[in-house]
Amino acid sequence: MAATKAKTSPGTIALNKRAKFDYQLHERFEAGLVLTGWEMKSIRAGKVQLTDTYVFLKNGEAFLLACNITPLLAASTHVIAEPMRSRKLLMHKRELARLATATQQKGQTCVAVAMYWKGHRVKLEVALATGKKEFDKRATLKDRDWNRDKGRIMKAHNK
């Protein structure tokens, strides 16, 4: 039996499901990415991993760190491909100022939530987040299990 992919919208490239479990997401922003040619080809092939990625703010600019874009063998023969390099994010000054002030507060961080297509461009959804405690994670698991069981009960009841 083949492994099934998670149900995503047709424009979604990659999701960071771990961020939704580890953090409580507050405010979301859309950012563009500065990419090279081999990275675009790898993204089109779906070779992106957003797990454990975060956004680093420095000198009024935002950078995406720890995002793994695996190079294709055929597309990156003539360049030295660095899959884990930091990539610059393109955002408005007001959004960058909002992120900078929020991340300076205790307990706030900025994480990448999703990467998706918007037209022919690649966009990244960035969210301000606070870390969850262990009991918050257990409550999330409990709610998820209950919703799954509730769906099964309703499905059996409607037959």
Image (cartoon, rainbow, N blue to C red):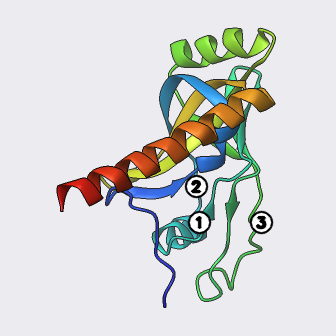
Q: Which residue is mark 2?
A: 35
- In the current view of this chain or complex, which residue is farthest to the left? 159
User: What is the three-letter code of the residue carrying label 3?
Assistant: Glu
Which class describes the residues within 10 Å of circle 1: few (<14), some (14-19), or many (20+)? many
Alpha-carbon neighbours of circle 2 within 10 Å: few (<14), some, or many (≥20)? Answer: few
Judged from the image, the secondary structure of the residue bearing numbered disc 2 is loop
Q: Position of residue 126 (x, y in %)?
A: 56, 33
Residue found at x 53% / y 12%: 94
- Mark 2–mark 1 contact, CB under 8 Å? yes
In the image, taking residue 6 as reference, residue 84 lies left or right, namely right
For the C terminus, the image quarter is bottom left
Q: Residue at x 64, y 40 (%)?
A: 21
Q: Amino acid at mark 2?
A: Leu
Q: Earlier along the polypeptide chain: callout 2 or callout 3?
A: 2
In the image: residue 19, left or right of residue 65: left
Q: Secondary structure at mark 1?
A: helix
Label 3 CA crowd tier, 10 Å (few <14, some 14–19, many 20+):
few
Vertical position of residue 3 compared to residue 19: above or below? below
Q: Is residue 110 above or below residue 100?
A: below
Res. 20 in view: no
* Label annotation for residue 82: 3
Question: What residue is disc 1 on?
Answer: 39
User: Is 99 on the left-hand or right-hand side of 146?
Assistant: right
Amino acid marked by disc 1:
Glu
Instruction: List x then y, in percent, for residue 127.
Output: 57, 29
**Residue 13 on image: x %, y %:** 46, 59
